[in-house]
Amino acid sequence: MDMRLFEMKLANHKMFKEIKDGLSENPSGKLRNLLDMRDDVAYVWNATENCLMSLNLKQLEEHGEETMCQKLHFLTPPSFSVERVMSSPCGSRVCLWGSRGVTIAELPSRWGRGGLFDSGNQTVLCKSVSLDERFLYTLGDVRRVHWHPNSLSHVLVLVSDNTIRLYNIALRSGPKLVKVYTIGPKPSSLLAGKTILDSLGDTAVDFTPTPDGDQLLILRGDGEVYMLSCDLESKSPPHPKLTGPIAIYPPADDNYGSESCSILALGGGDVPPMVIIATCTASIYHCLLLPNSNESEAANGDSHALYVVETVELNIVLNSEDDALQYSYPVQLIQCAGGAYAALHAGGAHAVSLPALASLAHYARGDEDAESLLASLCSRPSVSRYVVHTGGARAPCAPAGAVVTAPPLPTLLVLCADGALIARSLEPYDLEEQLYKEIQLKNPALEQDDLRNMMKERQKLTFSSIIQDILTREVSQPILHTDRRHEPSPKECLETLSSACVRLRGEYVRRLARAAAALADKLRAVHTLAERQRGWLHALQKEIDDVQLQSVVLEEKRLLAEKHQDDIKYRCSAVVRGLRASCRASPAERELLAELHTYKRCRERFADQIQQLKQHSKRNAEEINKWQEEYKKKDAALGKTHSDSIQSILQQQ
């Protein structure tokens, strides 16, 4: 699936026109993500009809915009405002949740030629259940929901009372609350509409599992990170120990942000986890989760520590008259493939690439030493791109959802509040190289040494990488998507156009001039090399002609040598025969000759005897034939007198 499918067919499908009215309603004002994709099926929540709409992308690729979208209705529809849509890793369930509830729905089987739900019916009824509906709707405030990293039948729910609730959703009797993990003091008193702990940042705002799935990283509003074990099969106590806050190095006075809002862990395998912490001040911190080197802290239970590698500041433009949003930018982190992630906020979406993950992977495989790793971490910083700008002219227009398509060429799909779908590619050069490495690593026919040599050859500096480095932008110009109901004023249009022209002149034209100069130098070098190669070609052609002439001469000499060789062989044979004839016979030869003469005489005597036996056999055969002929000539009939006498005797009797 390429970009044309998402830009031309998916973006123009009628499904997004049907959900347009429901997307514009967001009474809570929170960031939403009503779009998800799993197994080539796109899911989007329709708030108007209170159903989940699905679209098969393979069918869309074959049949175009006329592909039917299915509406999944639930037996127990959500009674709350849906803010997130999450499909399970196996694709058999979907989770809808908001600040006032969580609903789990079981998707029907897919069969038929098109792989549609319920054999392609437009309306499909799904079994659904709500988790602790009364408690979450009246007393709780859901902050985050995750599928359990080690189980397809368990769900983790973070509630505003500083607890994480673990539910088993695969029981026939319905979902069951398995455990309640207490991760802090329970908020009680209110201050200006918020609990005191919320105001002080002492409540958990987000959590994420580590790449190995053994631990949960819990983020509080004041930037502190805690760790909690989430192994279902271990014989740990019912309430596992909460470790933390995890030490962060180098230490900072504000603990790297007092308004943290989102956390994400990337990596996996032998690569140390890269923890991403986002704040409401549009700052993102990249931290490595490593074992704690401080022995005193490790003895107290703090087995790990966070080491801040770099800080990324997002350039968010809202163009809003609301002063409350001028200094607070809640960010939602979305994991992407290939060492990257997307940041969704009220002003649109950013794409951030992490070259440090590739350097860590090389270091884990032993391709780099520690010094090379530190040099690559310092020389290759992360790159942030403003891919989509959805801020309106007079009011912010936060995206309604975003999802990243599956490899090999991941694409960021951003669903705007007016139903428009925008597709943007994520670092095509890095993804192409990552795809090449994945294909080579999955090839079992290559030896490890050959693979490393191929990787080193691939990592050589090419001219395309030089041009790419010249054209690399320090800032990005996002796609501007405004609400048609709020047209910008002429002054705002002029300011936007002037800013874009200045940015274009400073970021693009100057870099294009440098790239043109590099191309001209490269062309001159290639032209000079071509002239030298033409000279080398002429010399090689002359040498080829000389070699061909020498080959003809050598062929004639070979034929003459073969003729002389045959003559010499004949003469040698004649000499050998003459030598043998002139030499006296040896005793062995004389004995062999006498024996041969004896055999010859015996042969002659036996031949005479055989000849005599043949003649005797011939005479006997002739006599036998003569006797047989004479026997046949004898007449055994009676005479006339004898016959008459016999008749008379018989008559008398």
Image: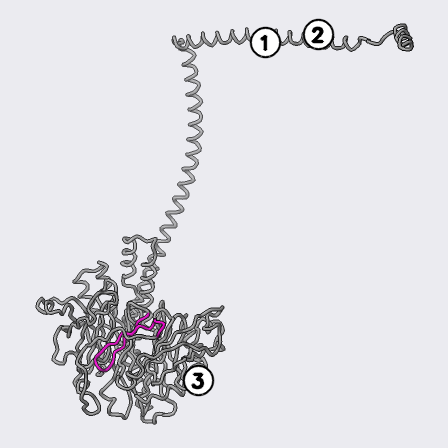
Q: Amino acid at mark 1?
A: Ile
Q: Amino acid at mark 2?
A: Glu
Spot occupied by residue 440 in the image (x, y as percentages of width and height) = 33, 59
Spot occupied by residue 599 in the image (x, y as percentages of width and height) = 49, 9
**Location of mark 2 (residue):** 623
504 lies above or below 555: below
User: Residue 4 appears in which quarter of the rendering?
Assistant: bottom left
User: Residue 237 appears in which quarter of the rendering?
Assistant: bottom left
In which quadrant will I find the C terminus? top right
Marks 1 and 2, how far apart in space? 20 Å
**Location of mark 1 (residue):** 610
Spot occupied by residue 248 in the image (x, y as percentages of width and height) = 14, 73
Q: Amino acid at mark 3?
A: Glu
Are there few (<14), some (14-19), or many (20+) residues within 10 Å of tag 2? few
Magenta-colored span: 153-173
138 vs 582, nearest the viewer: 138
Please tell me whether residue 167 belongs to the stretch shown in magenta.
Answer: yes
